[in-house]
């Protein structure tokens, strides 16, 4: 998980090596032990890497790979290498090395600009082809390895972090107010825009092509498969196939340098743990250690008893970490300053302590259960599909099961089942008749909180931007649309990238066996009712783990367990009043016209009074954005960027005029 850099164009050729190294130095948190820069015509490429990543199981000992006119720098761990090598041999391409960068260079020789589509793994890379005068940069669909780009004068700069690009002396530091507001609102967010107008993100699963004299072209090299609603092989056969796929995925990602897993009492990470135990017991050079968060009895995050049963089933143990010993908001202002972007991960502290615990166990790889929610369960959107298709007996059975568990009333049925199935014109008519917006339950719908100023929302078309970020449903069912859209939501990749960064800074690499391309394609072939039926979820994943996990762990649960909301909200109750007080009398977000601070404070008081965890977290996200803005605009009191000052002056001019 290195820092990689590319600077291209005639102007880049005039850069001194010392200047290129300064750009790398700005990314030191992604690697600093070994660095290398290489000039290739009108291009500079660089890598900075931690010493432990020099192992061939990670990015490897070769920092830049140069063969003929092609130079490659990569931040990559590739899996299923034998399959890739066979495909390369079939194309007549000979390997000259076995690091990930060598494999990427060979893939470029075999498939050109489309090479990223043939790779399986966690990767970000930059290729410079001096013969064609073309730069190619790409990321995998999971998005754990970041990559950003900016047109700086006549040069193109591509780097692993925004800081690496902003370190270029000619790069503008003008703020992108719409993207900043989206982060402060925890909206879906643009797949490519950042809080800096000059800097763009290469989306997860996308490839950038740049030719000197032209603008960069960015397009998807990966699209989620089409999810099925019905059909497929028999349930038990599918469960066996899923188990085999997960075994293979785990085996590809286990490291001889030691592997840990953040083990919960749910079904996702336990499935990875169980398959991992099967694999390591057949491989003498592999190990898998468990780490688990412990919460007090009665806490909604507590799964201690379930976790204890899981590890006992495999005659092993777990390293317990007391949640009360992990301050949720420690180093608040400093953490905001360290982030490239305003959006925080609400459970940063937990993820960091898991990573440091993994390193303390002597491991270099950390697994998690990411992917289970996206692939093996779905929201109640499938009920609206049943209504729309006239499958009323099935709908009646499903709704009765929900109602029997206290989860359904007439109002819920109208909102969650009838309204989503109605044509858009009828919904709009119902909204007109009601005199308010009919917000149907849908996980892809997000709205700005009420403290974001209405005039700002209108001026920057935030609602329209939010709708544009959700892929069109077309002729797909609501359930299949939701499942496919979840895999390309920018927020998912950004959160995954944040957790990967915490792991890297602790000295371990995050890997996600469930979020594997082969498992995703398999999951897409399975019917919706395997994901949710009545109040049961993840039926196929649970069946696949039969015999590998205790029966009572795999049994259906009437409510979700392992949600450490109380852990977070307790910290918010203690810290947010002080942080809000420090923001007065003039928050920078208010100076920019984004928030109404009085409404923000009132919303916090209301959330405290109602003990509304979701509202408290929404306020927290905005406060994080404020502190990020203070840290990154060079002033504790006023924004210093051109955009910030322009917005501030414009707002004051309007106030004077009125």
Image: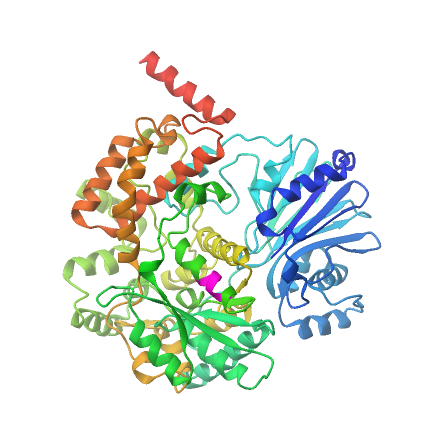
Q: Residue at x 64, y 36 (%)?
A: 151
Q: Is residue 525 something one can see in this rendering? A: no
Image point 53% across, 56% down: which residue? 143
Q: Position of residue 519 (x, y in %)?
A: 51, 72
Q: In the drawing, does residue 499 fall left or right of residue 217?
A: left
For the C terminus, which image quadrant?
A: top left
Residue at horizontal 37%, vertical 53%?
Answer: 444
Q: Nearer the viewer, residue 387 or 398?
A: 398
List the single residue furthest toward the right: 68
Q: Nearer the viewer, residue 581 or 176?
A: 581
Instruction: State left or right for residue 647 relative to residue 428.
Output: right
**641 w.r.t. 277: above or below:** above
Which residue range is magenta in the image? 354-358
Residue 629 in view: yes
Decide which of 45, 507 is in the foreground and name it. Answer: 507
Question: In x, y percent, where is residue 469?
Answer: 44, 47
Where in the figure is residue 40, as x and y percent of width and height?
80, 46
For the rendered model, the colour scheme is rainbow
């Amino acid at each position: 998980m290195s820092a990689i850099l590319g600077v291209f164009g005639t102007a880049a050729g005039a850069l001194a090596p010392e200047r290129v190294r300064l750009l790398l130095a700005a990314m030191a948190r992604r690697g600093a032990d070994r660095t290398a820069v290489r000039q290739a015509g009108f291009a500079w490429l660089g890598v900075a890497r931690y010493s432990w990543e020099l192992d061939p199981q990670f990015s490897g000992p070769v920092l830049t790979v140069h063969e003929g006119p092609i130079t490659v720098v990569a931040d990559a761990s590739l899996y299923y290498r034998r399959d890739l090598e066979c495909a390369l041999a079939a194309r007549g391409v000979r390997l000259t090395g076995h690091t990930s960068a060598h494999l990427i260079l060979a893939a470029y020789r075999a498939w050109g600009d489309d090479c990223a589509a043939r790779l399986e793994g966690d990767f970000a890379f930059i290729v410079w082809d001096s013969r064609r005068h073309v730069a190619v940069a790409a990321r995998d669909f999971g998005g754990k390895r970041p990559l950003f780009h900016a047109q700086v004068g006549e040069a193109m700069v591509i780097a692993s972090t925004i800081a690496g690009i902003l370190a270029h002396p000619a790069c503008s530091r003008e703020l992108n107010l719409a993207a900043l507001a989206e982060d402060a609102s925890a909206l879906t967010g643009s797949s490519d825009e950042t809080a800096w107008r000059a800097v763009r993100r290469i989306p997860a699963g996308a490839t950038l092509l740049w030719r000197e004299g032209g603008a960069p072209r960015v397009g998807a090299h990966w699209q989620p498969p089409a999810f099925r609603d019905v059909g497929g092989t028999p349930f038990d056969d599918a469960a066996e196939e899923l188990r085999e796929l997960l075994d293979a995925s785990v085996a590809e990602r286990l490291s001889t340098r030691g592997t840990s897993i953040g083990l919960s009492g749910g079904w996702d990470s336990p499935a990875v743990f169980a398959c991992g135990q099967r694999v390591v017991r057949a491989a003498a050079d592999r190990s898998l250690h468990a780490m688990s968060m412990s919460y007090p009895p009665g806490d909604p995050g507590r799964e201690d008893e379930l976790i204890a049963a899981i590890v006992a089933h495999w005659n092993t143990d777990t390293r317990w970490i007391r949640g009360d010993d992990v301050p949720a908001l420690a180093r608040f202002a400093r953490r905001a300053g360290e982030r490239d972007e305003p959006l925080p991960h609400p459970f940063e502290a937990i993820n960091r302590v898991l990573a440091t615990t993994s390193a303390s166990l002597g491991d270099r790889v950390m697994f998690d259960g990411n992917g289970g929610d996206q692939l093996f369960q779905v929201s109640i959107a499938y009920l609206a599909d049943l209504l729309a298709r006239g499958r009323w007996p099935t709908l009646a059975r499903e709704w009765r099961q929900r109602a029997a568990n206290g989860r359904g009333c007439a109002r819920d049925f109208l909102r969650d089942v009838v309204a989503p199935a109605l044509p858009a014109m009828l919904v709009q008519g119902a909204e007109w008749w009601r005199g308010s917006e009919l917000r149907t339950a849908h996980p892809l719908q997000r709205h700005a909180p009420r403290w974001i100023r209405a005039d700002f929302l209108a001026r920057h078309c935030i609602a329209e931007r939010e709708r544009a970020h959700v892929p069109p449903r077309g002729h797909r069912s609501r359930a299949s649309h939701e499942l496919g859209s979840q895999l390309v939501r920018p927020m998912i990749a950004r959160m995954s990238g944040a957790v990967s960064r915490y792991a890297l800074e602790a000295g371990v690499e995050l890997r996600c066996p469930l979020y594997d391309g082969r498992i995703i394609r398999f999951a897409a072939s399975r019917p919706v009712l395997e994901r949710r039926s009545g109040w049961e979820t993840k039926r196929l994943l649970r069946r696949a783990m039969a015999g590998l996990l205790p029966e009572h762990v795999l049994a259906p649960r009437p409510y979700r367990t392992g949600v450490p909301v109380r852990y977070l909200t307790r910290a918010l109750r203690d810290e947010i009043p002080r942080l809000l007080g420090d923001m007065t009398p003039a928050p920078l977000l208010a100076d920019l016209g984004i928030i109404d601070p009085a409404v923000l404070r009132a919303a916090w008081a209301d959330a405290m009074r109602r003990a509304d965890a979701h509202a408290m977290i929404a306020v927290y996200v905005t406060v994080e954005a404020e502190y990020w803005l203070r840290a990154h605009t060079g002033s504790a009191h006023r924004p210093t960027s051109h955009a910030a000052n322009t917005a501030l002056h414009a707002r004051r001019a309007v106030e004077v005029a009125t």
